[in-house]
Every structure is written in C-alpha cells, then in structure tokens.
Image (cartoon, rainbow, N blue to C red):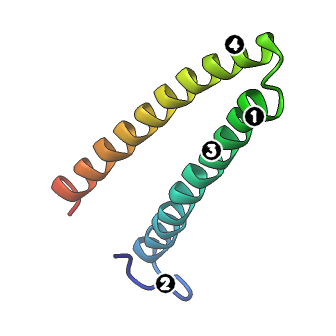
Amino acid sequence: MFPPPPQQPSTFSELVDLFLYLIYLLIPALFAVLFLFIAWKIIDAWVINAADERKREEGKQLALVAVLVIVVMLSVWGIVEMFSFTIFG
C-alpha cells in the first residue's frame, strides 16, 4: 500500500514525500493508541470497578465520546485521503 520510504531526500519533493510517509505511518499508530486507551478505560469502568455506580456512568460517557471521536477521526482521514487521491493523485 505504501511505497518504500525515501532513503535520503535530495530535493524538496523527496522531503515532502518523506514527511507524508511518516504521517501515513503515524495515523494508524494514533488510531491504535486511541483504541487501546478506550478499551482500557471501558474495562476499568465496567469490569474492574463494576460495583461503583459513578465509575459505570463515567464509562458510559467515555464510550459515547470515544465512538464520536473515532467517527470524526475516520471521517477526517477519509476526506483527506479523498482529496489526496483526486487533487494530488
């Protein structure tokens, strides 16, 4: 899916390609970290502290906010990809 990383940029275009390559690596890593954080907080709220009503309510709020954040992040990423393939591709 991704081209191999540029070894050492000698032109501005190659430098931009290197930055874009790094960004394309960081975005899925950001999604993974976000998913792990959300999973841990939900497990903490609903499994570890299941007897605490306040923690369960915080878990419900966190789950709602997390779903909204993931939907927004995926939407923005999709729009950026659409523009990159139509305008710059």
Q: Mark on residue 58?
A: none
| Residue 81, position as x, y percentages in the image | 30, 52
**Is 17 left, or right, of 88 in this rendering?**
right
The mark nearer the N terminus, 3 or 2, is 2
Please tell me whether mark 1 or mark 4 is closer to you in this view.
1
| 34 or 3: nearer the viewer | 34
- Residue denoted by label 1: 47
Please tell me whether mark 1 or mark 2 is closer to you in this view.
1
Circle 1/circle 2 CB separation < 8 Å: no
Q: CA distance from mark 1 to mark 4?
A: 13 Å
| 57 or 52: nearer the viewer | 52
Q: Quadrant of the C terminus?
A: bottom left
- Residue denoted by label 2: 6
The mark nearer the N terminus, 1 or 4, is 1
- Residue denoted by label 4: 57
Circle 1/circle 3 CB separation < 8 Å: no
Mark 2 falls on what kind of element?
loop
- Residue denoted by label 3: 34
Please tell me whether mark 2 or mark 4 is closer to you in this view.
4
Circle 3/circle 4 CB separation < 8 Å: no
17 is higher (above) or lower (below) than 60: below
Which amino acid, by three-letter code, is at mark 3?
Answer: Leu
Which amino acid, by three-letter code, is at mark 1?
Answer: Val
Q: CA distance from mark 1 to mark 3?
A: 19 Å
Identify the image quadrant of residue 48: top right
Residue found 59% across the figure and 59% down from its top: 29
